[in-house]
Amino acid sequence: VFGRVDAAPEAVVQGRTLAFSSLSNVALRPGGEAPLQVNVAVRLVTSGGWLLVTTALAFGLSTRLRYGVWILPQLGFRVLLLGVAAGITYFAAVVAVLGFGPSVGVPMAAGLTVAFFALRAVGLTVVGGYLGELMLRRWVHRPLPLTLEVFVGVFAMLVIRFLPLVGGVLWSLGSSVALGMGLVALATTVTDREPAAGLT
């Protein structure tokens, strides 16, 4: 967790190791010889997956996520701190449940991982919607579908991810914000709130 796993040349490791190098990256390496490198093709496939999932979430949870887009700038740095706390809590929970052994700990860790990425997907949809709204409103001065704003915003984030040096840092920051916004979007009741009435 927050590191990398390298097998020595003379080591014999059966199975695979899973390294969470940051809040945004997971490195899968084979148990034996050469490491399985994350290349451009894999990143393109995962980027397409993020675009598909976030656009689908924007379509299915438009009211809740539109409220998240509205409240995001009001939260400021608090949402980043919330996301970092959620990420650290997740990693601590995974390490803790793995202590129960492979028969119990591995399924629990897998369940936590699914919940982690689902939470991040919801938050990434909100962040993408906010960025897409900022970008599109410069040219179109009327309300646009949330799905379009999310697609444009998430696409811009994924393009930035491929930038050398700063791309990984910015993507990690965005992932932390996404975790925080995922918690806010899922934990907030929008039907009782006055601003949500005009967001559909």
Image: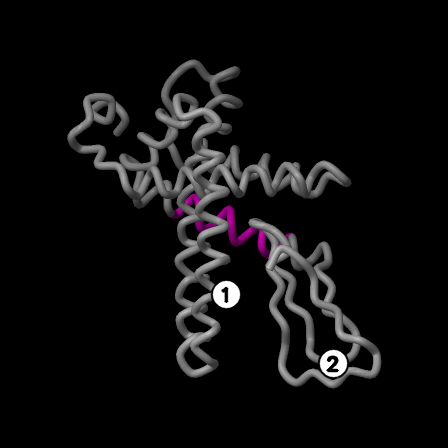
Residue 53 magenta: yes
Query: Residue 177: x and y, percent?
Result: 49, 37
Front one among 36 and 45? 36
In which quadrant of the rendered view does residue 171 lie? top right
Question: Is tag 2's residue or tag 1's residue first in the polypeptide sequence?
Answer: 2
- Name the amino acid, label 1: Val
Crowd band around label 1 with a 10 angstrom C-alpha radius: few (<14), some (14–19), many (20+): some
Residue lying furthest left: 192
In the image, residue 196 above or below residue 94: above
Q: Is residue 170 visible?
A: yes
Residue 59 pos. (x, y %): 34, 42
Image x and y of residue 79, in percent: 44, 33
| Cα separation between marks 2 and 1 | 23 Å
Residue 55 image point, x, y percent: 43, 44
Task: Please state the total of marks drawn on the protein image.
Answer: 2
Asked whether, in this view, residue 108 is left or right of residue 38, the answer is left
Secondary structure predominantly adopted by residues drawn in magenta? helix
Q: Which residues are magenta?
A: 44-56
* Residue 124 visible in the picture: no
Q: Quadrant of the C terminus?
A: top left
Q: Which mark is residue 95?
A: 1
Q: Give the vertical position of 177 relative to 102 (above or below).
A: above
Give the residue pinned by disc 2: 32
- Identified at 46% across, 41% down, the residue is 83
Residue type, label 2: Gly
Name the foreground residue: 60 vs 165. Answer: 165
**Magenta stretch containing residue 59, yes or no?**
no
The color scheme shown is: one colour
